[in-house]
Image (tube, rainbow, N blue to C red):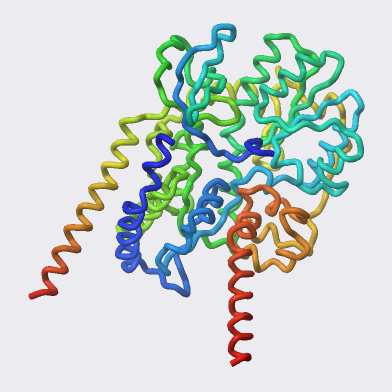
Amino acid sequence: MRFVDEFRDPQLAKTLIERLHQRAALLPYTAKKPMQIMEVCGGHTHAIFKFGLDKLLPEQLEFIHGPGCPVCVLPMGRIDACCEIAAHPEVIFCTFGDALRVPGKQGSLIQARERGADIRVVYSPLDALKLARDNPARQVVFFALGFETTMPVTAVTLQQVRREGLTNFSVFCQHISLMPTLRSLLSQEDVRIDAFLAPGHVSMITGITPYHFINEEFGKPLVISGFEPLDMLQSVLMLVDQVCDSCCKTENQYRRVVPVEGNLLAQKAINEWRGLGLIEESGISLTKAYQCFDAERRFSPQAQSVADDPRSRCGEVLTGRCKPHECPLFGSGCTPHNAFGALMVSSEGACAAWYQYRHQEAAIAESTSSQQKVSQDEC
Amino acid sequence: MAGATTMCIGIPGQIVALHEQQPGNAWAEVCGLRREVNIALVCEDKPEALIGCWVLIHVGFALSRLDEQEALETLAALHAMEEVEADVALFLRAGEGR
């Protein structure tokens, strides 16, 4: 695929890794206290595991998996509200596929569907819009979920709904803004992150400027990165170079997609539609002009506040304090098929990625060592 | 549930034609297949100028125009690094022989 294959060239990757090893030797970090690089985006987390990039890093560097996966930071209470709305007999509830399995206190959307709710998986909000056109007697609710990448898409869909005068379409808004999420992460006292790989596709919307506070207020270097192996290795090298050269700035490795100013049309669409009413600092609500499309106003689900279950360590994994397999529930009480926490649900969640790519390796290593033990015993 | 996710992953596609019935849409070719995409977020006017352009597609919308020049420059920088590394390796190996 164009713009993909070129950035997977193994020879160039090898060169980058060699260079990375040379430069990392100059860092004031060690294997015991490595430089912690947080990849914010779940898409990056997935790529790291898929290509085994973490295993190629020099011992002075370590990836920490960040909070940039929309379903991973989805409060359980919001899923309960979705299930309640979806249970209305006139409602067709439309969602992206990865939100289906996220557990709420009253179960997931899949379980709500088993109880009879009409819940459909859509690829695009435009599919939900088509359902509204085709089913004028039904109420279509679109579960609008995601960071800045997906926000303008919801905005353009609502503009279209307004133009067409449809009265049977609304959105359940769970959009989250990335910058306040990062600020709140960095404001936690015991979080030690040394540098950031910033999400390429959020950045193609926001541009580069919104990241400057991470350099200026928190003194952390940041590189906006693409998603292919060469992109990510080059971005890590840029971060290492910044530290070696005692720099702290925002750099853009993903220039083929991310313009300095971002996507101005998308920013305009978002600003027209989102209000200032922030939910828990980073949540986005609809402006007055668009409140008539707010599913929560239309269906008034009960306010839900569900505390995190103390048995899981999702919060610690999201902030880099704990590795997925160190959680007591990992692989036993919590698997992708029967997820206890949202990080195990989406393929870009740190726990799901770890389970998919590392759990089998661990099992193979275990069976190999037990086979060796058997053959040794036989000898 | 294939392809239906909130994750911010985009795929590159080339705009090959405008949609005759829906002015906000165009046809993009992705891995040899034609798919309809919304182009409202990558062009305000003159949609015909988009034909032939590469765009990044996410949940049915073109969200960014891909800059081929920038892509080539990034790759050129990586290749240049490869050449320098090869030179350094040769130089060091030559030193060992002495």
Where A279 falls versus B53 (above or below)? Answer: below
Where B55 falls versus A193 (above or below)? Answer: above
Q: Is residue B40 left or right of residue A325?
A: left
Measured as percent of width and height from the top left, residue A135 is found at 81, 16
Measured as percent of width and height from the top left, residue B69 is found at 31, 31
Measured as percent of width and height from the top left, residue A367 is found at 63, 75
* Residue A81, image quadrant: top right
* Residue A4, image quadrant: top left
In the foreground, A245 or B67: B67
* Residue at far front of view: A379
Q: Is residue A38 visible?
A: yes
In the foreground, B93 or A307: B93
Q: Is residue A365 left or right of residue A169?
A: left
Q: Is residue A374 left or right of residue A247?
A: right
Q: Is residue A292 visible?
A: no
Q: Is residue A67 left or right of residue A293?
A: left
Picture quarter with the N terminus of chain A? top left
Q: Residue at x 61, y 55 (%)?
A: A353
Q: Residue at x 62, y 80 (%)?
A: A371
In this figure, what is the number of numbered marks? 0
Picture quarter with the C terminus of chain A? bottom right
Q: Residue at x 91, y 35 (%)?
A: A116
